[in-house]
Every structure is written in C-alpha cells, then in structure tokens.
C-alpha cells in the first residue's frame, strides 16, 4: 500500500492487459486474399456442378428414348428410366448425383454403356496439349510483335504503320476460331496439300489446329501489349533510364516489358480459358481426338452423362486457370491481394 501512487483525482490506473491475451490479431493480406479466393472457388464449383446436373432436365428431349431408339417398346423405355432413377423427385436425383460425384462414380455412357470417366481421361490429354501449344504460340507471337510495334510507333511515329497494324489486328481478332479452321483447311490442306486435313498422326497434324486457335488471340493480345508498352514508355522511370544513356535493348527488355506483365498475364489467362473451351469446334473441324468431337457427338445423341462430365471438366479447367492467374498476379503485385475479392 505504501508504494501505491494515487493521482490527483484519486483514480488508480488499471494495469495494462497482457499483450496477446484475448486479442484476435487480424489476418494478413495474403491469408485474407486466399480465404476470399477459395470461398469464391467453392461457390463457383457448386454452381458448375448444379448447372451440369440441370442439363439433363433443361435440354429438350428424352435421353432414354434417344439412347434406345424411336422404335423401342414403351415398357423397355419405362424400365430403363426407372433403373436410371429418372422417375425420382428432382431433389432425390440431385442428392444421388452429388453423392456419386464425391465417390468418383460419374456414370456410364447411354450410347456405348462404357464408363464416361474412361473416355474423358483418354481424350483430355489431347485437348490440353492442343490448348497449351496454342497458348505458347500466342505468347511467342504477340509479346514480341506488340513490343516491336510499340517501339516503332512510339511518340506518334510511323502513323501509317500504326493504322495498318491496329486495323489488321482488329480484323484478324474478330475471326471466329471455327471459321479460321475452315479457311486454313481449304488453303493449306485442300488446295496446296501441305498439311493433312484431319487426325493426329505426326507433328505436321498439329500445325493447322494450333494456327486456327492462335491467329485471332495472338492479334488481340499483340494490340494489348502495344498499348501497355506505349503507356510504360511515357513514364518517368523510362525517361530517367534514357538520361543515364542505357542501351535501348536494356530499357525495353529490363524496364518497359516487365511493367506490362500484369495486364498481359491477366488477358493471357482469359485467353487460355477461352482456348480450352473454344477448342470444341476446332477439334471437330480437324477430327482431333480430344473432348470436342466427343462432346458434339454426345449432344447430338443426347448422351447426357457424357455431356455432364465434359461440362464439368471444361468448367473445372477454366476455374483452375483463373485461380492460377490470380495467384500469379498476387505474387507479382502484392497490392492486388487487397483489391481482389
């Protein structure tokens, strides 16, 4: 008591609470970003799974009748529907569908009665290979082309070259992949015979499908790279680098190009997602042994178990690519972990 110090008002200050006791520390920006991103991914996966389930109920036509044929007896059709559980209430079917997915049971094809997972696992690598080759081709063409055009047309120089590049790139980017595929087949397979029309039998069979997927996307990305590089070339740090009499190659490659990676990677991720999905018609045109022809034939035959798993695979690939792009962008620019939700 003798050592107790009383202030003028007679109040005794309460001892400070021990640091760290009962205090919830806020999560760091990376942890908050990951939690938000994973939560959004979970919701997106659930929406994708539900959409794939509803396909069999939204698309007109009877899948059992389509699989058995128009001349199948009605009692056989009814027994088949009962055996597949299509007569059960919708919520019961949905619960069974979710249970089968999480237990690895994706069903069998209604046409050939084979497990749909076997067919997809056999054809998926061919689709991924085609998409990756097309993506690499796009990047190798678009980034050097966009950088070169930005250097040649900076500060309003070579106005005719700029107008010619932007106009031609805009027209090429507007060409759909399947139309580019038909044009390439006609010119380089039918007329000249330089490349095979269809199939996967050697390195030369990759040329036309990859070109059909790459032409429009490379033109679009090169325009973006040019605009981004032009914006960077007008920044103060570029003028500072020029004042130090650095070589042009170092200014462009070490200072200008890396500062355009954020926008370029964002668009490149979107392009890769579109390549995976847009390869359906291109693969069908070239009879490529991927998921594209399988999906088209399954839709025409109303083979809904096959359509469902292919939709899930395509959707999962798009979601995974978007997740990887977000993580890469967050690693390159930590400030984006605060902006992204």
Image (spheres, grey):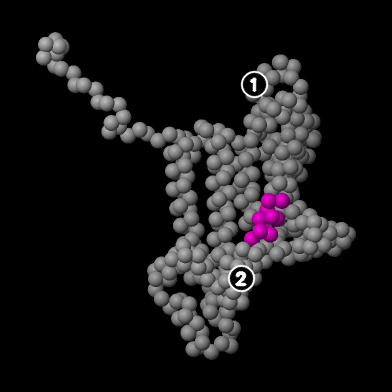
Kind of element beneath mark 1? helix
Q: Nearer the viewer, residue 152 or 106?
A: 106
Residue 169 in the image: above or below residue 317: above
Q: Residue at x 18, y 18 (%)?
A: 13
The picture quadrant where one finds residue 119 is bottom right
Q: Secondary structure at mark 2?
A: helix
Report whether 300 appears left or right of 24: right
Judge whether 251 appears above or below 89 on screen: above
69 left or right of 101 in image: right
| Residue furthest out toward the right | 192
Q: Describe residue 66's horizontal placement relative to residue 185 as left or right.
A: left
Residue 82 can be seen in this image: yes
**Local crowd at mark 1 within 10 Å, few (<14), some, or many (≥20)?**
some
How many other residues sit within 10 Å of disc 2, few (<14), some (14-19) or many (≥20)?
many
- Where, by quadrant of the figure, is residue 154 drawn? top right
The structure residue drawn at horizontal position 71% and vertical position 46%, both measured from the top left corner, is 136
Indicate whether residue 131 is drawn in magenta: yes
Q: Evaluate whether residue 231 shows in this view.
A: no
Q: Which residue is mark 2?
A: 298
**What residue do we see at 68% from left, 59% from top?**
126
Percent coordinates x, y for residue 170 in the rendering:
71, 45
Farthest residue in the front direction? 2
Give the residues drawn in magenta, as a range.
124-133
Q: Which residue is mark 1?
A: 237
Q: Earlier in the sequence, mark 1 or mark 2?
A: 1
Query: Is residue 299 shown above or below 278?
Result: below
Would you say the residues marked 1 and 2 are in contact, meaning their CB atoms lie under 8 Å apart?
no
Q: Main secondary structure of the magenta part?
A: helix
The image position of residue 275, as x and y in percent, is: 65, 53
Q: CA distance from mark 1 to mark 2?
A: 56 Å
Q: Nearer the viewer, residue 5 or 175?
A: 5
């Amino acid at each position: 008591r003798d050592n107790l110090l009383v202030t003028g008002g007679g109040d005794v200050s309460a001892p400070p609470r021990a640091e760290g006791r009962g205090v919830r520390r806020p999560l760091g920006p990376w942890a908050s970003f990951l939690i938000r991103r994973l939560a959004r991914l979970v919701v997106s996966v659930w929406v994708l799974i539900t959409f794939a389930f509803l396909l069999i109920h939204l698309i007109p036509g009877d899948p059992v009748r389509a699989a058995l044929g128009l001349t199948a007896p009605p009692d056989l059709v009814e027994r088949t529907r009962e055996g597949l559980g299509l007569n059960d209430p919708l919520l019961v079917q949905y619960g069974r569908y979710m249970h089968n997915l999480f237990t690895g049971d994706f069903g069998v094809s209604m046409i050939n009665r084979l497990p749909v997972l076997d067919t997809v696992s056999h054809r998926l690598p061919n689709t991924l290979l085609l998409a990756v080759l097309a993506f690499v081709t796009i990047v190798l063409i678009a980034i050097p082309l966009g950088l070169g055009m930005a250097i040649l047309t900076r500060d309003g120089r070579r106005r005719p070259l700029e107008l010619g590049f932007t106009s031609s790139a805009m027209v090429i980017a507007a060409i759909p992949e399947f139309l580019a595929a038909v044009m390439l087949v006609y010119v380089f397979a039918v007329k000249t015979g330089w490349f095979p029309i269809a199939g996967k039998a050697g390195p030369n069979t990759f040329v036309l499908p990859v070109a059909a997927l790459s032409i429009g996307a490379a033109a679009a990305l090169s325009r973006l790279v040019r605009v981004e590089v032009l914006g960077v070339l007008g920044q103060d740090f570029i003028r500072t680098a020029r004042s130090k009499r650095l070589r042009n190659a170092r200014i462009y490659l070490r200072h200008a190009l890396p500062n355009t990676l954020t926008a370029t990677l964002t668009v490149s991720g979107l392009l890769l997602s579109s390549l995976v999905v847009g390869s359906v018609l291109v693969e069908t045109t070239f009879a490529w042994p991927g998921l594209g022809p399988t999906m088209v034939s399954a839709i025409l035959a109303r083979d809904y178990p096959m359509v469902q798993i292919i939709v899930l695979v395509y959707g999962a690939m798009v979601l995974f690519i978007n997740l990887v792009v977000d993580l890469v962008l967050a690693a390159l620019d930590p400030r984006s972990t605060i902006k992204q939700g």
